[in-house]
Image: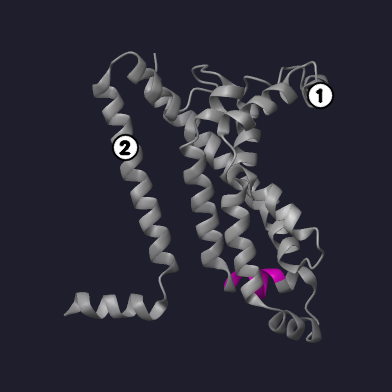
């Protein structure tokens, strides 16, 4: 029988990995749209995207739980399409994670697109580059660090989720039991040795990931200066 904590780790990595991919797919065009938007409604859309930053996770989880139930349209449509209930499933925690981590991906990308400006894109268009060519050969290379930052923050935030996951996923081993819930279980059972092990592992991995993000975003001249200092 597989170790429950190892099983929770696997579920967590699967959830965070899939969530990050979906966030990049959805967040990239949304970030681009917001960066180029001039309508007065831009503020409203930005506020909706950023809402998870200030909204208690249990509030979002509660309304998602209602929406995912078979009594309401999203849950009904899912059950008709898949034959399975959406609430308390792996799919539910992925959808919830996408909504809850969306601002951590959209905001870095939106800022990068706004700083990029239009001059290079207009030059590319004059030279005959289509929209996809301009994105993959101009935008993507110039904003690569922001994409790495957005993916890292989205992944890290998803790994650390607790309230939303517990509300819409419960605590089903091998399905919705993730590391944050496993840690809570150990604390409830007064098994502080295992709780310490999980907590310190999450703390160290988070520090390593954030340090890598800050290193990537460090100005190139500072990185070179640090390298020279280290060589001396």
Quadrant occupied by the C terminus: bottom left
Q: Nearer the viewer, mark 1 or mark 2?
A: 2
Side of 19 where 161 appears, left or right? left
Query: Magenta stretch: residue 171 in it?
Result: no
Q: Which mark is residue 201?
A: 2
Side of 144 where 87 appears, left or right? right
Residue sitting at x 76%, y 83%:
122
Q: Main secondary structure of the magenta part?
A: helix
- Badge 1 marks a residue whose secondary structure is helix
Q: Nearer the viewer, residue 167 or 14?
A: 167
Q: Indicate whether 131 appears above or below 49.
A: below
Query: Magenta stretch: residue 139 in it?
Result: yes
Q: Nearer the viewer, residue 44 or 195?
A: 44
- Badge 2 marks a residue whose secondary structure is helix
- Residue 69 x, y percent position in the rendering: 73, 18
Look at mark 1 in the image and give the residue it sits on.
81
Q: Which residues are magenta?
A: 135-141
């Amino acid at each position: 029988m597989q170790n429950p904590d190892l099983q929770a780790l696997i579920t967590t990595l699967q959830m965070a990995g899939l969530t990050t991919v979906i966030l990049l797919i959805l967040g990239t065009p949304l970030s681009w749209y917001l960066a180029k938007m001039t309508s007065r409604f831009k503020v409203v859309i930005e506020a909706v995207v950023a809402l998870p930053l200030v909204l208690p996770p249990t509030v979002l989880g509660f309304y998602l739980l209602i929406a995912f139930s078979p009594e309401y349209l999203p849950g009904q449509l899912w059950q008709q399409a898949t034959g399975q209930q959406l609430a308390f499933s792996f799919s539910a925690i992925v959808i919830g994670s996408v909504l809850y981590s969306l601002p951590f991906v959209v905001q870095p990308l939106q800022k990068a697109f706004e700083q990029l400006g239009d001059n290079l894109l207009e030059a590319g268009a004059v030279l005959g580059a289509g929209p996809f060519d301009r994105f993959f050969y101009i935008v993507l290379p110039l904003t690569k660090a922001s994409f790495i930052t957005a993916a890292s923050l989205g992944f890290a935030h998803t790994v650390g989720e607790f309230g939303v996951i517990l509300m819409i996923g419960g605590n089903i081993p091998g399905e919705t039991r993730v590391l944050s819930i496993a840690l809570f279980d150990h604390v409830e059972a007064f098994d502080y040795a295992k709780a310490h092990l999980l907590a310190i592992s999450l703390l160290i991995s988070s520090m390593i990931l954030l340090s890598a993000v800050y290193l990537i975003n460090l100005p190139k001249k500072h990185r070179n200066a640090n390298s020279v200092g280290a060589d001396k």
